[in-house]
Image (cartoon, rainbow, N blue to C red):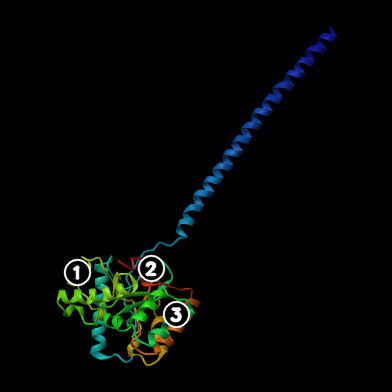
Amino acid sequence: MKKFIVFILLLLTLALAFFYYKFYITNKDSINKKGSSNIVKDDVNKSSKEKPNDIQSEPKDTIEEIYDIKGVSINIKGKSWDNMLESRKKQVALAKKYPDSVFTNGITTKKQIALTYDDGPDPGRTDRLLNILKNKNVKATFFLLGEKVKANPKIVKRIFDEGHLPMNHTYSHKELTKLSLDKVKKEVLDTENLIENLTGKKPNIIRPPYGDINAKLIDDYFDKENYKIALWSIDTLDWSQKEATNIVKNVEDNVRNGDVILMHTSATDETLKATETIIDDLRAKGYEFVTIDKILNVPAYR
């Protein structure tokens, strides 16, 4: 009898041990699955939190603001200064009315600057400027007059070959709003053809002399032909300055992301001195120098 009771107790012990083992294994798997699920969820949550930050870290190429035009000169006073301020207001108003074709400044979401030089090419001074730009590893934009392109083809070729943009400043620097439409077209196309003959490229970006443009010309010609009008957001007024420091001051006191800086190769050697300082100082502040097509985000050529 005792042996039978011992046998029964042994069976019960084995049964309890078996059921305990099954319970442990089952719950262990459940715990592991739950833990694994939580890890996956944590990874997903972490990933979803990180992605927006990654996207936000890449600035978009947009013009979020159309700037007022900056730049002063102690040598421009009275009515002449008043007329210049009025002209600037009209230029900014046109940039706001035609945001896809008329520009004062470029992309404001990047720390970029465009150096632009009007009224060349000029023998001697343009070559010296090109030497400076080459030494500084900076690309610039030259708005060229057709009559000077015709007289100085080698300089135009050098501008193009060294990676700068030779763009259109019309043939003879006349106020376009005072010309007939046919004469405006001739001023533009004669220069365009001369540049194309030297570079194989038709410039797509035009700067009207004096920034003289109106809605009628834009509607009747420039927009119809898909030209882009590049004005400026900082006028150094270098042609009126007697010292490079004043040219530099106009830039450094006003500089903003996307500024288009206006200078002239026909003005004075002070422009060349100022260019070196502007490049060094703005680079030290983290600015990058780009050509006009890049800062406006438009094609350079047709």
Give the amino acid at mark 1: Tyr
Residue 294, which numbered label? 2
Q: Position of residue 180 (x, y in %)?
A: 14, 77
Mark 3 vs mark 2: give the one in front.
Answer: 3
Of 263 and 151, the residue lying toward us: 151
Name which of mark 1 and mark 2 comes first in the sequence. 1
User: Which structural element holds mark 2?
Assistant: helix
Give the amino acid at mark 3: Leu
| Label 3 – label 1 distance at C-alpha | 34 Å
The crowding category of the residue bearing disc 1, from other C-alpha atoms within 10 Å (few below 14, some 14 to 19, many at least 20), is: some
Q: Which residue is mark 1?
A: 221
Residue 101, which numbered label? none
Residue 115 seen in the current view:
no
Residue 133, which numbered label? 3
Q: Residue at x 23, y 73 (%)?
A: 189
User: Which structural element holds mark 1?
Assistant: helix
Q: Position of residue 38 (x, y in %)?
A: 57, 41
